[in-house]
Image (cartoon, rainbow, N blue to C red):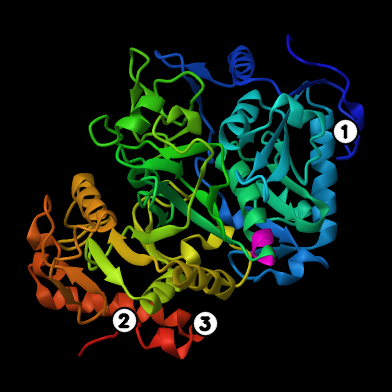
Amino acid sequence: MPGDSRNFATPLASHGLDPQGAVHWNLGWEELHRISIERGEGKLTAHGVLLATTGERTGRSPNDRFIVNEPGLAEHVRWGEVNMPIDPEVFEGLLEKTRQHLDNSDFLFVKDAFCGADPEYRMPVRLVTEKAWHAAFMHNMFLRASKKDLVSHVPQYTILHAPDLRSEPKTDGVNSDVFIILALDRGLAIIGGTHYAGEIKKAIFTIMNHILPTEGLLPMHCSANTDGENSALFFGLSGTGKTTLSADPGRALVGDDEHGWSDNGVFNFEGGCYAKLIRLSEEDEPAIYATTHRPGSILENVVLNADGTPDFDNDSLTQNTRCSYPIEAIENRTPDSMAGNPKNVVFLTCDAFGVLPPLSKLSPEQAAYHFMSGYTAKVAGTEVGITEPQATFSTCFGAPFMPRHPRVYADLLSKKIRENDAKCWLINTGWVAGGHLESSRIKIKWTRALLNAALDGDLDDVLFVEDERFGFQVPTTCQGVPDKILQPRETWHDKRKYDNVADLLIDNFEQYAEDCSEEVLSSAPRVIG
């Protein structure tokens, strides 16, 4: 097998590995893609783009993700259904199993990179995997190390990645044949049993989200862009439109998923993007569409037409079809993946109930409340077992990746908003007119028109009215958007049904009351009647 197969036994020994097969260090994407094809890991589309499928697991596996419960950083984890503890002895057993599996692999691929575009805060990371295409994914998604960087690269965190290794739940002490385990103070993460590439990036970002608050920085599950003077943040879970809305021809992209906010401004954690492709159209999302034709990108779980071109409407494998591409594939971007302090903070929610307005303006207290509750819907395909939209609440719009108590992140956000006098908006990219069972999702062009009007100040002179239930301010008109959809209650034929659904949603917000101050609670939504 061609490639760099030099003996790097010493650095791998530091991870407890003694590989018997060839070890390929820091190959470029061209070589990794070629090896992937030769080994049958994937195939090429008609445009020469690598396509990989992940089998049964086509999304994240939250029930199989654990953090080792041991002294140190883990003492500050908020344990629960999201951050599940695992005993050190269980981790040690699976760690040894993972090492033995990788040692016996015919080939190992090592990829060194960085997480965090700001040189002051970037974290050196490493992936050791048995699959060339996963190394190529790492190449796309993290900040690529230069030859000079590689000479002295010492990873702060390493992922040992064994997608072909299946655990045995009864004997290994986990929930299924898949495991994702973070050992915060050991600088290690182990992943086994799943080929879904998103687990790689989310493992590293979870670690960053735990570490940065100790330095006074706010880690955020958000996208960001800028017009050169005013930057904007877009919070939201997968499928709410972060990638789509931040890829705006009139604004330079900073990043599409994970960022840090320091006193100097915002910086991207990533070196690439991981865009959802289901029902992708060139008209609505030209920048993302172009990346699916660009060699170097990786399509994941996309079905091809007979002529080898992608069928973005085909969800027979999953609705969570993806494209991984380096951020350089987006021409309209900031050159250093950094920007100044944001002047607009946008919360994106995919409201499956259909009761939230397409756009609302929030007070700082309302912003804190909605950040704590993080209402949205789990969109089909983003997690195992999700086949249709389901209402859910994810604190900080990213609870699965935020190990600390949500107050830590909420307090940091409030502090940053006050210091920078930022405006806050809530945008519903989901449904109106009866919810997802009775209508279609709001048109992207309407959402983009509302967003651009907010960011450009075009709504400053528009009449806003207060929503009697939710308390936020709602515009009465916006150019390019039908006035009738701005007040969602008016789109429902049965107004009493709207009232009942809205009040049910508000009841669900109550679970976050105990985490909020009296000042924030005074701005909380209220049940009427």
Mark linked to residue 429: none
Mark 3 vs mark 1, CA separation in Å: 45 Å
Residues tagged 1 and 2 counted as in contact (Cβ below 8 A)? no
Q: Tag 1's secondary structure?
A: helix
Out of 227 and 306, give the one closest to the viewer: 227
77 above or below 341? below
53 above or below 374? above
Residue matched to label 2: 525
Give the main secondary structure of the magenta stretch.
helix
State which quadrant residue 25 falls in: top right
Residue 290: horizontal and vertical position, in percent? 36, 25
Three-letter amino acid code at disc 3? Asp
Residue matched to label 3: 515
Which circle's residue, 1 or 2, is located before the other in the chain? 1
Crowd band around label 2 with a 10 angstrom C-alpha radius: few (<14), some (14–19), many (20+): many
Three-letter amino acid code at disc 1? Pro
**Residue visible at 22% across and 60% down in the picture:** 358
Which circle's residue, 3 or 1, is located before the other in the chain? 1
Residue 37 is one of the magenta-drawn residues: no
Crowd band around label 1 with a 10 angstrom C-alpha radius: few (<14), some (14–19), many (20+): few
User: Is residue 320 left or right of 425 when viewed as pictured?
Assistant: right
Out of 174 and 126, give the one closest to the viewer: 126
Residue 122: horizontal and vertical position, in percent? 67, 46
Residue matched to label 1: 11
Q: Which residues are magenta?
A: 210-214
